[in-house]
Amino acid sequence: MAVQHPHPRGETPVDADYIFSHYTIGDELGKGGFGVVYEGRRLEDDLKVAVKYVPKTDDTECIFIPDHPKPLPKEIALTILANKGPIVPEVIRLLDWQDHPDHFVMVLECPSPSENLRKFMRRHGGTLDEEKTRHIMRQVAHAANVCCLRGVFHRDIKLANLLINSETSEVKLIDFGCGDMLRSSPYRLYSGTADYSPPEYHVRGTYYGRQATAWSLGILMFVMLHGDLPSDHDLLQLKQKRCSKPGLSTEGCDLLGALLQDKPRRRLALGLILHHNWFKVVT
């Protein structure tokens, strides 16, 4: 049964152009400091969607992007840019959006069945085998690189921001709320999840988008294989081309070491990740 959809200040708009007049809103899918995500249905064709409702605050940043004369909330802008061009199945699709003075709404595709990767791992005993990890990493590395090629720095690639179809193992990168426009100059603030932040940020207070993305992919891969974040000892072992995971292939160990290089200039370039030998292993 559909529940009453959210409206700013609780009023019910009569404007047929208001985005919620085109969808029925159902159960809550998630909630956080950003706002609320609801399951929904598009009235014209009954397509299942995810509807994200975000109240604006004094911290809501708006930016200009091409083809849009007015500044947009950064999350909308980045999601539009990540979707610009041929459809990339590994990046969540933005189907509709609307910006208002005190809130904004995003309508996103809602793959079914799906769950975030953290819940998926929990159901599979807390770790994934190398074959499953490879299948997921292939998709996430592609999504990350496409975003950067389209000028988008996601900055929060982690288990909770990856949806996986439990039947097909198809993966989609979601939630650009911590992201920024990709630039060639260094960043001085990190708004993503601290556990995935690159070491150079903690040492120097600056980092570059592509190199930070490669590091976060290394953390993601390590967590999938080991069930936990790498310790300082784990990182030292990788630096010495050793792995703490029993039975991990030489290629897998090598890729982890290439992504989790403490010196960003030595880190494997984002565009070269999928050319690594680990992805050429026949299973």
Image (cartoon, grey):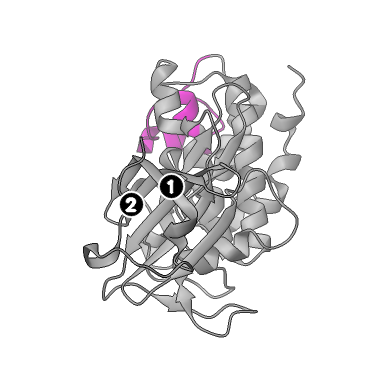
Q: Residue 244: within the magenta?
A: yes
So how many labels did they put on this image? 2
Q: Please, what secondary structure does the residue beneath circle 2 have?
A: loop
Residue 257 position within the rendered picture, expressed as x and y whole percent measured from the top left:
56, 38
Side of 99 where 276 appears, left or right: right
- Residue at x-position 32% and y-position 57%: 34
Q: Is residue 2 shown left or right of residue 279?
A: left
Task: Locate the N terminus and report the quarter of the image it occupies.
Answer: top left
Image quadrant of residue 229?
top left
User: What residue is shown at x 38% (from left), y 62% (from top)?
Assistant: 190
Where does label 1 land, which residue?
24
Q: Are marks 1 and 2 in contact (CB under 8 Å)?
A: yes
Nearer to the camera, 150 or 97: 97
Tell me if mark 1 has few (under 14), some (14-19) or many (20+) residues whose alpha carbon lies within 10 angstroms of its own: many
Q: Relative to residue 82, is residue 194 depicted above or below?
A: above
Horizontal side, residue 58 vs residue 283: left or right: left
Q: Quadrant of the C terminus?
A: top right
Q: Is residue 238 found inside the magenta-colored segment of the image?
A: yes
Question: Label 2: which residue?
Answer: 5
Q: Residues within 10 Å of mark 2 (few under 14, many from 20)?
A: some
Relative image position of residue 216 (x, y in whole percent) = 49, 47
253, above or below 152, in the image:
above
Give me the residue at 61% from left, 60% from top: 82
Q: Quadrant of residue 121?
A: top left
Residue at image coords 40%, 28%:
119
Find the magenta span and give its range.
222-246
- Helix, strand, or loop for circle 1? strand
Mark 1 residue type: Thr
